[in-house]
Each structure stands twice: as C-alpha cells, then as structure tokens.
Amino acid sequence: MSLKVSLFGITRDIVGTSVIELPAPAPATVGELLAEMRKQYPALGELRSCAVAVNNEYAAHDHPLRTVDEIALIPPVAGG
C-alpha cells in the first residue's frame, strides 16, 4: 500500500515532480509522512514551514492517513 502526495511550489521543485507515492507505514500519520519525506528529500527540512492538507483540509501532525486520502504538501507562500 502507498500514499499518493501532490506537491506544489518549492516542494515540487525540490522533489522534481508534482506527485509522488510513498510506502504507507501502519499506522501512518501526517507527522510520520513529513519525517519520511524529509529523510528522502533533505531540502524539504530546510523550509521554514510546510502545511499538509488531507482531503482538502489542513491536517495536524497526529492526523491519521489512509491510502484513499487525497494528500497535498503546501509550501509557505508570500504575497503582496
């Protein structure tokens, strides 16, 4: 089983693609997903902040993940 993660902005640039699939640990949480992604892509750990959305809603680090979830990594944005 795997988790499919959509990437945007700088996170997409760091990883080199707009969608990745990672093996799903059991049980999986947002925090565990971020830790695994930072292990595989160390430059992600250099970002000041990075939000995760699960099924179109921001999710906390302890939010459980299922393989059917729509997961997105949302980088910090600047505006003016």
Image (cartoon, helix red, strand yellow):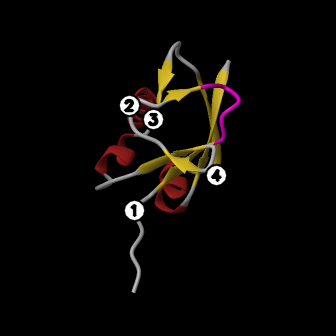
The Cα–Cα distance between marks 1 and 4, rounded to whole angstroms, is 16 Å
Instruction: Name the amino acid, label 1.
Output: Pro
Packing grade of label 3 (10 A; few <14, some 14-19, many >=20) is some
62 or 79, nearer to the observer = 62
Mark number displayed over residue 37: 3
The Cα–Cα distance between marks 3 and 1, rounded to whole angstroms, is 16 Å
Residue ID at (52%, 62%): 9
Q: Does the magenta portion include 42? A: no
Q: Nearer the N terminus, badge 4 or badge 3?
A: 4
Which quadrant holds residue 41?
top left
* Mark 1, residue position: 76
Q: Which range of residues does the magenta coloring cover?
A: 66-70
The Cα–Cα distance between marks 4 and 3, rounded to whole angstroms, is 14 Å
Residue ID at (39%, 75%): 78
Compared with residue 62, is residue 15 higher up or lower down, i.e. above or below?
below
Figure quadrant of the N terminus = top right
Compared with residue 80, is residue 9 higher up or lower down, i.e. above or below?
above
Instruction: Name the amino acid, label 3.
Output: Met
Image location (x, y in percent) of residue 18:
64, 52
